[in-house]
Image (spheres, rainbow, N blue to C red):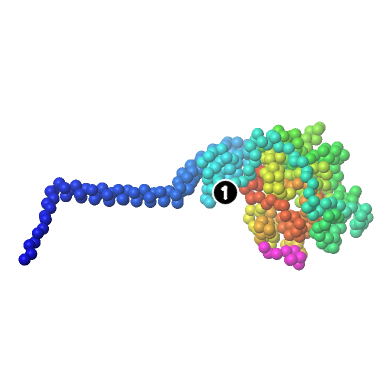
Amino acid sequence: MFQNKSVSISLSDEESDELGRMRVRARRKRKKLGNRRLLRKLFVRYWMLLVIVPAAGLFIFEATRIGRSLNGLNTNNSIETRTHRIDGSSPTLRKAPTNLNRLDPTTHVVAGIRELIEYASANAWYLIVLCILKCGCLKLLPPENLDQLDIPVEQESSRIPVGEVLYMSESDRSFVGVNVTLSQLRTEDTRFNLFTGNQTFEERDRSFEVKETMTVHCGFFGVNGGFKISDQDKSYMQGCKVVVSTCAFGGGDDLYQPIGMSQASLKKVCYVAFWDEITVKAQELVERRIGENGFIGNWRVVVVRDLPFADQRLNGKIPKMLSHRLFPQAKYSIWVDSKSQFRRDPLGVLETLLWRPKSLLAISEHGARSSVYDEAKAVVKKNKAKPEEVEVQLNQYRKDGLPEDKRFNGKKALCEASVIIRKHTPLTNLLMCVWFNEVVRFTSRDQLSFPYVLWRLKAFQNINTFPVCTRKDLVNSMGHVRKAKPLQS
C-alpha cells in the first residue's frame, strides 16, 4: 500500500573536502580568538612584571659596573700619610681613609636589589623600580634649588607645650661642696660638679613634667665650672644662625673638612670645631695648625680650656647636646661626631629632614638593635661601660616603668646619635638638657638614655628617626684615629 519514496543527494569528493576545510578554519579562528583573550588577560594581570624584570636586570648590571669603577677609584686613590704620635715618638706610616672626600651615593639593599639613589634619579628605568619598591635614602633637592634655599621665617604657634626654659645656676641653688676646686672634683668619684650643678632625684622628676615655663639643670652652673671659651670665639658664635659642629678632645681624632655644600650654605652656615689643648698639639704634629683668623679650612676652631670632666667622653657631650647654650642665637644645628666627615649641603639636609616633614629633631635609627635593654647587654659585652654603672641605670629605668617595647609611637626606640639635626626651640632645648643630665648621672653611652628621655617627655612627638642608610649618606665614617688622652688633674 505504501511506497517508499526517498531523495538521495550525492556529494562529490570535492564538495566533501571543502566542507572539512571550512570546519578546520572555524576551529582555528576560535582557537586564535581564545589565545588573544588569554594574552589580554595575562597582560592586564602581569603587565608590571614586564616593566620590572627588564628594569631590574639593567639596574643590577649598571650597579655592578659602577661599583667596580668606584672600588677601582678608591684603590687608586689610597694614599700613605705620615702620622706622628702625641708622645713625640717615631712617626708611623698609615694609609689615608678610603672614605675621605667621597661624594658618591650610598647603596641600599631593598628586596635583594642594591640601589644607587642619586644615580637612579637621573634614569627613568631606575625611577620606575624605585617608585615600585618605595625605597630611598637622602632625598636632597637638585643643586640649582639648594642655592636658592634660605632659613624659613619663624611662625608663632599657640600649641607649643613649652614656652620658655630657664637654666639653674649657682646663684639659684648652692652646690653641695661649693668650696672645693674643679680639679678636686675631677679626682673624686662623682659625675656632678661645678659645671653641672647637683641635680637631685626630685629635680630630675620635675624636669620631665612639661609646662609653660621649665627650670632645669643644663650645664654652665657656675663661673668656676670650666669649659672656658675666649671672648673672640664667643663673639663669632653669637653671630651663627645655622651651625654644623663637632669636637675632638684628648687628641683622639683628626679634623675632616666638610664637602658637598652649596654656595648658599657657605655664606649662611657656621662650621665650628671644639678642641682642647691636647688636640691642638696632636694636630700640629700632623701639620694642621689654626690660622691667625681662627680657621682651618672651613672650620672655625674654638679651643676650650678648663674642661669640667676627667672623662673626655663626658666633655664631648657638652657641644653635642648643649649647642643651644653655646650658640644662643642659632635657630638650627647639626652635630657630627669627630670620627665622621660631613658630606652634604647643610641647608639641604635641614630642608629634607626637618622642614619638609615638619619635624623638630632628626636622628638615626640604631642599625643593630631596637631595645634599650638589649643595647645595655651589648655595651657591657664590648666593655663600653662598667657593668655596675649600666646595672644602676637599668634598675632606675625599670623602677620608673620604662617598658620593654622596642618601638615608641611607631618609631624604633633605640637611636644612634653620631648625627643630630635639630631646630632650637624651648621643647628641643629641654630635651637636650634632660638628656645631658641623664648622661652625667649614669653612663656616657647616650643611646641608653635617649629612649628613656623620649618616653618621659610625652609632649615631644615631632621627631624624625631616619634609617641607617640616610645617616651613611650624610657622612663619610672614618672611625677613631687614635685613643683620646684623659684629662690630667
Task: Locate residue 413: give its quadrant.
Answer: bottom right
- Judged from this view, the residue extending furthest toward the left is 1
Q: Position of residue 269 (x, y in %)?
A: 75, 38
Relative to 267, say whether 335 is above or below. Answer: below
User: Dot 1 lies on which element?
Assistant: loop
User: In this image, 184 relative to 279: left or right?
Assistant: right
Q: Give 262 or 98, whichever is nearer the viewer.
A: 262
| Residue 62 lies within the magenta run | no
Look at the image and tell me in which quarter the N terminus lies: bottom left
Q: Position of residue 451 (x, y in %)?
A: 72, 58
Q: Position of residue 68 (x, y in %)?
A: 53, 40
Residue 439 in sight in this render:
no
Residue assigned mark 1: 134
- Judged from this view, the residue extending furthest toward the front is 1
| Residue 402 lies within the magenta run | yes
User: In this image, 229 relative to 460: left or right?
Assistant: right
Residue drawn at 24 percent across, 50 percent down: 23
Residue drawn at 20 percent across, 50 percent down: 20
Residue type, mark 1 in image: Lys
Task: Locate residue 69: give its quadrant.
Answer: top right
Which segment did they paint magenta?
397-405
Residue drawn at 76 percent across, 67 percent down: 399
Q: Position of residue 312 (x, y in %)?
A: 78, 50
Q: Give 181 or 200, whichever is nearer the viewer.
A: 200
Residue drawn at 21 percent across, 48 percent down: 21
Q: Give 256 or 188, whichever is nearer the viewer.
A: 256
